[in-house]
């Protein structure tokens, strides 16, 4: 089962990017004050709890670690959203979506199709 890890530093983010060279990585950005974000995070956690896929799973709290959230937007070239999820392989974003489009089924489908 995948283990969810919070990214707190630039070094943590670099480890996640490096992990994507070994296996697919999911990176979730969330606001801890937003109900839409809370629901999307529930969907993300439900996926993690039920998956048997070998995937790295990470999250970033955008308000608490804004600099890290901004760095993700810079490095991916994808405009910041919250909530937002990325599927990364070999340091490249293969898929991303945001808000209510973040569902357990959408994550599974993205990994099946892209990962």
Image (cartoon, rainbow, N blue to C red):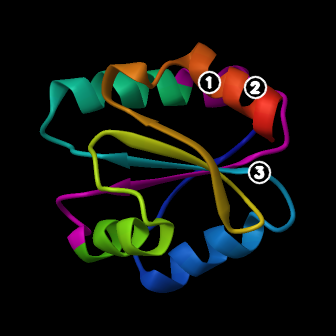
Residue 74 position within the rendered picture, expressed as x and y whole percent measured from the top left: 38, 74
Q: Which residue is at the front of the view, 77 or 50?
A: 77
Counting the numbered discs, the total is: 3
Q: Do residues under tags 1 and 3 come within 8 Å of each other at their CB atoms?
A: no
Q: Quadrant of residue 92?
A: bottom right
Highlighted magenta segment, given as a residue range: 46-66
Q: Quadrant of residue 1?
A: top right
User: What whole-number distance in Å separates the C-alpha atoms at marks 2 and 1?
Assistant: 6 Å
What's the residue at 64%, 31% (across, down)? Answer: 48
Q: Which residue is at the front of the view, 22 or 97?
A: 97
What's the residue at 37%, 75% (across, down)? Answer: 71
Which of the two discs, 3 and 2, labels the residue nearer the N terminus? Answer: 3
What's the residue at 65%, 71% (across, down)? Answer: 17
Image quadrant holding the C terminus, namely top right
Residue 52 drawn in magenta: yes
- Disc 3 vs disc 2: which is toward the camera? 3
Q: Do residues under tags 2 and 1 come within 8 Å of each other at their CB atoms?
A: yes
Q: Secondary structure at mark 1?
A: helix
What's the residue at 20%, 64% (across, down)? Answer: 64
The residue indicated by pointer 1 is 47
Residue 77 position within the rendered picture, expressed as x and y whole percent measured from the top left: 43, 66
Residue 106 position within the rendered picture, expressed as x and y whole percent measured from the top left: 59, 20
* Mark 1 neighbour density, 10 Å: few (under 14) some (14–19) many (20 or more): some
Please state if 33 lies on the left or on the right of 24 as rendered.
left
User: What whole-number distance in Å separates the C-alpha atoms at marks 3 and 2?
Assistant: 13 Å
Please state if 72 lies on the left or on the right of 63 as rendered.
right
The residue indicated by pointer 3 is 24
Residue 5 position within the rendered picture, expressed as x and y whole percent measured from the top left: 55, 56
Which of the two discs, 1 and 3, labels the residue nearer the N terminus? Answer: 3
Q: Which residue is at the front of the view, 78 or 99?
A: 78
Looking at the image, the residue that sits furthest to the left is: 33
């Amino acid at each position: 089962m995948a283990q969810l890890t919070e990214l707190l530093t630039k070094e943590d983010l670099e480890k996640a990017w490096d992990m994507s060279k070994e296996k697919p990585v999911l990176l979730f950005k969330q606001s801890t004050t937003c109900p839409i974000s809370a629901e999307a995070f529930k969907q993300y956690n439900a996926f993690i709890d039920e998956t048997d896929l070998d995937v790295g799973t990470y999250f970033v709290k955008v308000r608490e670690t804004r600099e890290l959230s901004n760095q993700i937007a810079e490095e991916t070239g994808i405009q910041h959203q919250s909530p937002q999820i990325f599927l990364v392989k070999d340091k490249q974003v293969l898929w991303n979506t945001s808000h209510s489009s973040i569902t357990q089924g959408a994550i599974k489908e993205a990994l099946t199709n892209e990962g």
